[in-house]
């Protein structure tokens, strides 16, 4: 049984209790939240978001550069005027380097019909790991503030503690 | 008052009731979910996810190509072995073209000190809009299945109906 089919079963209960069918497309609280994809974080529950409130952008590390396309669409087309970045303790991004993950990919590719393909593909991706959690938040705020494509709006950065569920402001 | 400060207030209640402080870093259900950033979708509530269950990757449209870096990290370093893609009805990505959003950015840039900067930056980004919702899910499944950097795992695609909360399988 796939997890997808379990999702279908769980969704039936959600549909039965669903009352939010008339929400507007633009986020009601005019905020875009950039959060790590980490399984332990539930942005809605931990930040108090209801359906309709906020754009929630998530990727490995909650990196701003990887979220740029989405932030631009959020601001230019859907009117958000604040950004909140949430990274977290015990993040997987603290545990490897670009070289580490490229080596894993290249090793897997050795058994393929075209190892050079794997190597070339791996080398084109910046995996955006970091060695200092607090600095990663500061860097991401600075990245957005310095982009000509991002509006001059309030940007806050937080570290979420996976042991306590608490967010702590960085900047 | 910023929305960020409202998040801090809401987070206090979450912390008080928090009981999930000992979850492992790798997702317990070994699945990565790619969902649109749309404010109306709560992936955890609508799919039945608990903290610790799944990587949740979100971007404008829930596009797979934009999620590739995160999917690779999810699979190679954190052991997920299934992917679920969720796009949705009434998506903002159905309402514009790359030219539309680039024109908006260039127009804003006209008042800046360096309009050429804006134009060049806008032209470097593929905003990944789509004109056919079902096809966008099929395309994204195909993108992942054909990437040498993505493992051969089950990949399912769904359309979430923002009027009913229901997910419908595409493939």
Image: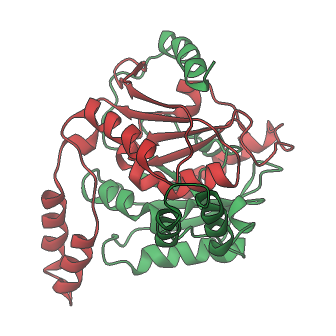
Chain colours: A red, B green
A24 vs A123, left or right, is: right
Identify the image quadrant of the C terminus of chain A: top left
Q: Residue at x 77, y 51 (%)?
A: B162
Relative height, residue B94 to residue A29 (above, below): below
The outermost residue toward the top is B16
A14 vs B8, left or right, is: right
Along the viewing direction, whichever of B35 and B151 lies nearer the viewer? B35
Percent coordinates x, y for residue B27 in the rendering: 37, 44
Q: Residue at x 83, y 50 (%)?
A: B163
Percent coordinates x, y for residue B37 in the rendering: 60, 50
Percent coordinates x, y for residue A16 in the rendering: 80, 40
Percent coordinates x, y for residue A147 in the rendering: 45, 51
Along the viewing direction, whichever of B50 and A28 lies nearer the viewer? A28
Q: Residue at x 30, y 72 (%)?
A: B149
Q: Is residue B171 visible?
A: no
B129 vs B77, left or right, is: right
Q: Is residue A105 visible?
A: yes
The outermost residue toward the front is B113
B62 vs A100, left or right, is: right
Along the viewing direction, whichever of B3 and A87 lies nearer the viewer? B3
């Amino acid at each position: 049984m796939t997890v997808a089919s379990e999702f279908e079963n769980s969704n039936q209960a959600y549909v039965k209790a669903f009352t939010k069918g008339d929400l507007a497309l633009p986020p009601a609280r005019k905020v875009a939240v950039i959060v790590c994809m980490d399984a332990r974080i539930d942005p809605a529950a931990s930040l108090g978001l209801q359906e309709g409130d906020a754009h929630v952008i998530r990727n490995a590390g909650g990196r701003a550069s990887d979220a740029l396309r989405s932030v631009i669409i959020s601001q230019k087309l859907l009117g958000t005027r604040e950004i909140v970045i949430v990274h977290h303790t015990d993040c997987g991004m603290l545990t490897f380097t670009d070289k580490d993950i490229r080596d894993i990919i290249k090793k897997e590719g050795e058994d393929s019909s075209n190892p050079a393909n794997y190597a070339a593909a791996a080398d084109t991706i910046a995996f955006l790991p970091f060695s200092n959690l607090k600095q990663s938040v500061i860097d991401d705020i600075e990245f957005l503030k310095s982009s000509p494509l991002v509006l001059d709006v309030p940007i806050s950065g937080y570290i979420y503690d996976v042991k306590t569920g608490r967010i702590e402001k960085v900047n």
